[in-house]
Image (cartoon, rainbow, N blue to C red):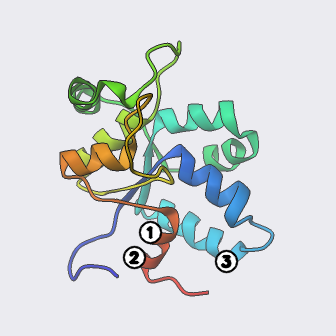
Amino acid sequence: MATEGRKLIFCIDTSSIIEARSVRYPVPVFPSLWEKIEKAISQANIISPEIVRDELKRNDPACYTWAKNQSGLFIPPDDALIKGVQAVLKSHRKLVDENLSYDQADPYVISLAQLRECTVVTEEKPGPSKRKDKIPDVCKSLGVRVTTFIGMVEEFGWRF
């Protein structure tokens, strides 16, 4: 539930948007959930770095179409965000796959959450991996709160 006097703000990762909208909570079955999500976006309670929009475009065109129409969801990069991304990557190099030719959203999501002092929302599971650092593990090491999509819904106190 909301902390007294503190505005709940969540920085949502690509994985949570895709998993929630396309798999677990599709709009035709959960229309009131998505109405609440859209209202929270319009009130700046749910944000995401602009790069998440690019990942959605590559990975889930239907989510991309929805998300690009959510005014205020995507925060463009500025100098502070870029410096934050560089700091995150300096301490957690395996957060991204250096073999990919495009930027990846994970360090942007974490950095934006640090800058805005908000909670990261991701469906990634913590745990060791030789291939990649996981968002929950990086958040824990940096002191950034992290939750899942359903955890965010619970913190908002929404009931259906």
Q: Which residue is mark 3?
A: 32
Looking at the rendered image, the disc whose residue lies closer to the viewer, 2 or 3, is 2
Residue nearer the viewer, 125 or 148? 125
Q: Earlier in the sequence, mark 2 or mark 3?
A: 3
- Asked whether residue 70 appears in the rendered view, the answer is no
Residue nearer the viewer, 52 or 144? 144
Give the residue type at disc 3.
Ser
- Which residue is at a point 67% across and 30% down the rendered structure image? 58
Q: Which residue is mark 2?
A: 155
Looking at the rendered image, the disc whose residue lies closer to the viewer, 3 or 1, is 1
Q: Earlier in the sequence, mark 3 or mark 1?
A: 3
The answer to whether residue 6 is above or below residue 120 is below
Label 2's element? helix
Residue nearer the viewer, 75 or 20? 20
- Asked whether residue 36 appears in the rendered view, the answer is yes
In the rendering, at what x and y percent does residue 63 appear?
69, 47
In the rendering, at what x and y percent does residue 44 appear?
41, 59
How would you rate the neighbour count of disc 1 (Cα within 10 Å): few for under 14, some for 14-19, many for 20 or more? many
Q: Going by the image, does 94 lie left or right of 91? A: right
Q: Which residue is mark 1?
A: 152
Instruction: State which quarter of the image contains the C terminus.
Output: bottom right
Q: Are marks 2 and 1 in contact (CB under 8 Å)?
A: yes
Give the residue type at disc 1.
Met
Q: Going by the image, does 131 lie left or right of 90? A: right
How would you rate the neighbour count of disc 3 (Cα within 10 Å): few for under 14, some for 14-19, many for 20 or more? few
Distance CA(mark 2)–CA(mark 3): 17 Å
Label 3's element? helix
- Which residue is at a point 21% across and 29% down the rendered structure image? 91
Distance CA(mark 2)–CA(mark 1): 5 Å
